[in-house]
Every structure is written in structure tokens, then in C-alpha cells.
Image (cartoon, grey):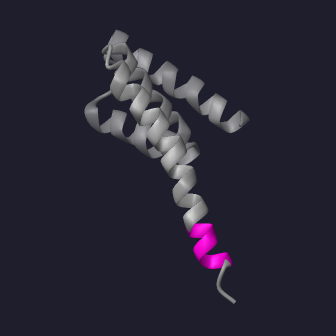
Amino acid sequence: FLVNVIGCLIIGVLAGLILKFEMFSSQSRLLLITGVMGGFTTFSAFGLETFYLIREKEFLVAGSYVFGSVVIGLVALWIGFALVSSRS
């Protein structure tokens, strides 16, 4: 939980710096946000994508993305677990 929250804070700072000051090249942005932060916690990338959708007033898309990612992800996990645990 703490890693996800810290990751969201860091990715928010990076995104803010990128938008406000255009601090990083596109290659550096890809490395920092996708590579470093994605490796630290994929939840931060999920949060950033959702934030961008909300910021663009794409509320239905953002809500669908959150709902789909969480609920469908959990259902897929349950199916995968059931497939493996039901076999002897």
C-alpha cells in the first residue's frame, strides 16, 4: 500500500514538472514514468492514466477504466487461481 501511495506521489511530481517546466525530453519521460516508476509500482501508472482522463473531463472513460481494471482484473485473477487450484 505504501509503495503504491509513494509511487503515485512521485509520478505526480514528475508529471507536474513535465507539464509546468517541460523538464525532460520525450525519451527521458518514457524512461522515468514507464521504466522507473512502472518498475517501482504499476499502480502509479494506473493512477496517472486515470488522472489524465479526469483532467480531460473524460469521466465515463475514467470510471470505466478504474472499474474495469479493478473488477475485471480481480475476476481474471480468481479464474486463474481457480484453474490452477482445481487441478490435482
Residue 18 on image: x %, y %: 36, 19
Residue in view at x 63 percent, y 36 percent: 4
Quarter where residue 27 is shown: top left
Q: Is residue 59 above or below residue 33?
A: above
Residue in view at x 59 percent, y 33 percent: 7
Magenta highlight on residue 65: no
Residue 19 on image: x %, y %: 34, 15
Magenta residues, dominant SS class? helix
Residue in view at x 56 percent, y 68 percent: 80
Q: Is residue 33 above or below residue 63?
A: below
Work out which residue is located at the far bottom of the displayed protein and give it: 88
Residue in view at x 47 percent, y 43 percent: 69
Q: Nearer the viewer, residue 21 or 7?
A: 7
Q: Is residue 42 visible?
A: no
Q: Is residue 65 visible?
A: yes
Q: Which residues are magenta?
A: 80-85
Work out which residue is located at the far top of the displayed protein and give it: 20
Quarter where residue 29 is shown: top left
Residue 58 on image: x %, y %: 32, 19
